[in-house]
Amino acid sequence: MSKVKLCLVSFGIIIGIIGALHGSASLMKGSTLVESNTVEVMMEGWPNDEFYTVSNGSPVFTILTGIPFYALGILAISVSTTLIVVSTTAIKKNKLAVGLSLFALLNVGIFLFGAGTGTPLFIGLPMVTAGIVSIFRTGKKERSELSKRRILYSFWFFYGLHIFSWVMFFPGFFILSFYAEISTALFAFTFISMPIGVLGALISGFLYDKSIYAESHSLVEPHLAV
């Protein structure tokens, strides 16, 4: 599997999980009506004041108003679950163009149906862009084994950084909020790491995918060899 495709699979699953969590929070608000396009899906003060304040109530965007929050939650969970399935099947097993089309469409659904605002914009959009570039930029560049290894190390660093930042937020901050105050510096580091991790992984992954080993050539022409 190419590194760009690995990002689409892994980070697509993350977007889906976060979307399902938003949907679950909406379910907890029951039959309360969605009154505006931008809403907080978490109940005020849930699960405690610290986490609610840090997460700002988990605001999302939705084109649907006047419906109960539980209906919005069901829709958010449905589109998020579908994205997880597509990420683990269509993207992983089929040609990139097929899975990428479904991935892009579902990210629009994530944004429009209350399953997340930041994730489809700051994670999904860069991944779709990288996927498109990867499809149309078919040329390869010769690189030394050392250069390829450095690019690969960079990829795994940024790939791990992005996943780590989400683990820090949930369940990390969720658990920590019951026992201590979450510092502003730690919160800022975690959320800044998310887009940095995505962009770094996509760029280095693309460079690695488009690299071929530059073999050394003999300085003596075969027909001149004694």
Image (cartoon, rainbow, N blue to C red):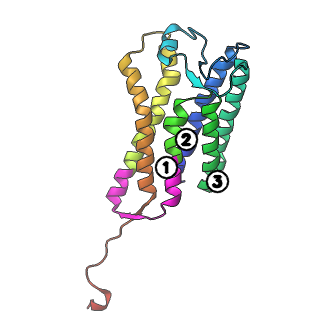
Looking at the image, is mark 3 or mark 1 earlier in the sequence? 3
Classify 10 Å Cα crowding around label 2: few (below 14), some (14-19), many (20 and above). some
Say left or right for 216 vs 32.
left
Measuring from the top left, give residue 147's x and y in whole percent. Answer: 33, 57
Please give the name of the residue rendered at 61% of the width and 38% of the height, measured from the top-left corner: 108
Element at label 3: helix
Please give the name of the residue rendered at 38% of the width and 15% of the height, measured from the top-left corner: 183
Residue 223, disc: none
- Find the magenta span and give its range: 129-151
Q: Quadrant of residue 144?
A: bottom left
Element at label 2: helix
Q: Nearer the viewer, residue 24 or 225?
A: 24
Say which amino acid is labelled 3. Answer: Val
Give the residue pinned by disc 1: 130
Residue 98, disc: 3
Please give the name of the residue rendered at 45% of the width and 40% of the height, measured from the top-left corner: 198
Relative height, residue 226 to residue 91 (above, below): below
Q: Nearer the viewer, residue 49 or 32?
A: 32
Measuring from the top left, give residue 21's x and y in whole percent. Answer: 61, 24
- How far apart marks 3 and 1 lie (CA) works out to 15 Å
Residue 174 seen in this snapshot: yes
Classify 10 Å Cα crowding around label 1: few (below 14), some (14-19), many (20 and above). many
Question: Is residue 65 rendered magenta in the image?
Answer: no
Classify 10 Å Cα crowding around label 3: few (below 14), some (14-19), many (20 and above). few
- How far apart marks 3 and 2 lie (CA) works out to 17 Å
Looking at the image, is mark 2 or mark 1 earlier in the sequence? 2
Residue 10, disc: 2
**For the image shown, how many numbered marks are present on the structure?**
3
